[in-house]
């Protein structure tokens, strides 16, 4: 399994609704911030470091998936691509992957820090604030340098957050998967992806043989791509995606405590 995503160090902390309101954040949302923009939300990371209960955890959605997959598939069966800085944060990520049996093929940026994500937890909800840092500088040529691993892969998993970084890298893997009839899994990752990165998503969508999203991401996709169905009708949205696909596709929509919707060319199930 080859996984492509944005490696991040998570800052996990329980916060109050008032803390979210302070930065105009929503529960169960995910946003990007840029250290160079002067965004006031960058202060969150320093504030979390001052909180004694804050946990620093190896993260990045796709990297978490890679470690989970290694638990199932076994050590040495999962390769993870992403970009990190040359710092103590990336060393921590590398160590966690090694312990999990994941082979880390990091592209290292010497002058940019490893990306980080503030996971602000309120009850059962989680608001994510991400500074991509070095993760934002992954380039397709890094795949070329390790193409033997790509050729050896039996399937691919792409985190949708990487659409904000290098759609070209995703397309490169997608083309290989299509030419060699390998499963290509794409997770939408967050509601802002279909809205803000619609063009990038449209580029890679034809290569995906499996799509994973939650109800909020499905709704965002329906609105962004102006599908002719209600944005709350998960089954109808999934059917449109399957119908319009040039390749056989399976769509999986999770829905919190509600039944998961699965639609493919072979039918529908929940």
Image: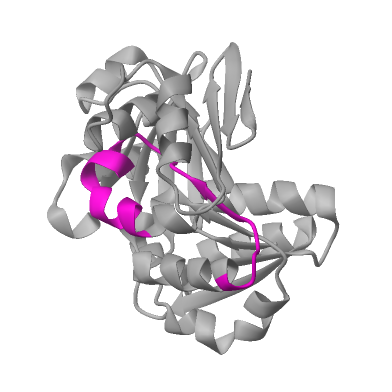
Quadrant (top left, top right, bottom left, bottom right) of the N terminus: bottom right
Give the vertical position of 252 relative to 134 (above or below): above
155 sits to left or right of 177: right
Q: Position of residue 32 (x, y in %)?
A: 29, 46
Q: As drawn, is 18 to the left or to the right of 127?
A: left
**Can residue 50 be seen here?**
no
Q: Residue at 58% of width from left, 11% of height from top? A: 257
Where does residue 90 sit, x and y in percent of width and height? Answer: 54, 65
Q: Position of residue 17 (x, y in %)?
A: 33, 14
Q: Nearer the viewer, residue 232 or 38?
A: 232
Residue placed most toward the observer, 110 or 165: 165
Q: Judge whether residue 105 is colored magenta.
A: no
Name the residue rendered at 46%, 30% in the picture: 238
Where 267 falls versus 116 (above or below)? above
User: Residue at point 63% right, 18% down?
Assistant: 270
x 62%, y 48%: residue:
64
Where is residue 125 shown, x and y percent of the image? 46, 19
Q: Nearer the viewer, residue 16 or 108?
A: 108
Q: Which residues are magenta?
A: 179-203
């Amino acid at each position: 399994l080859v996984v492509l995503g944005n490696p991040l160090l998570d800052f996990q902390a329980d916060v109050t609704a008032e803390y979210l309101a302070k930065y105009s954040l929503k529960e169960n949302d995910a946003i990007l911030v840029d250290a160079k923009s002067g965004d006031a939300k960058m202060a969150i990371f320093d504030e979390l470091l001052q909180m004694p209960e804050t946990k620093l955890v190896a993260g990045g959605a796709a990297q978490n998936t890679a470690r989970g997959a290694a638990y199932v598939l076994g050590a040495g069966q999962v390769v993870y691509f992403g970009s990190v800085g040359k710092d103590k944060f990336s060393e921590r990520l590398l160590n966690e992957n090694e312990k999990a049996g994941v082979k880390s093929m990091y592209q290292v940026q010497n002058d940019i820090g490893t990306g980080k994500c503030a996971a602000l937890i309120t009850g059962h909800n989680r608001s994510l604030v991400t500074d991509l840092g070095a993760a934002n500088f992954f380039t397709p040529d890094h795949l070329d340098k390790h193409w033997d691993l790509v050729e050896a892969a039996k399937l691919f998993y792409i985190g949708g957050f990487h659409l904000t970084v290098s759609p070209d890298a995703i397309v490169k893997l997608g083309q290989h998967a299509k030419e060699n009839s390998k499963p290509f899994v794409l997770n939408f990752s967050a509601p802002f992806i279909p809205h803000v990165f619609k063009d990038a998503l449209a580029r890679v969508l034809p290569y995906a043989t499996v799509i994973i999203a939650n109800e909020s991401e499905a709704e965002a996709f329906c609105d962004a791509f102006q599908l002719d169905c209600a944005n709350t009708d998960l089954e109808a949205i999934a059917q449109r995606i399957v119908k319009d696909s040039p390749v056989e596709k399976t769509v999986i929509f999770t829905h919190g405590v509600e039944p998961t919707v699965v639609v493919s060319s072979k039918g529908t199930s929940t």
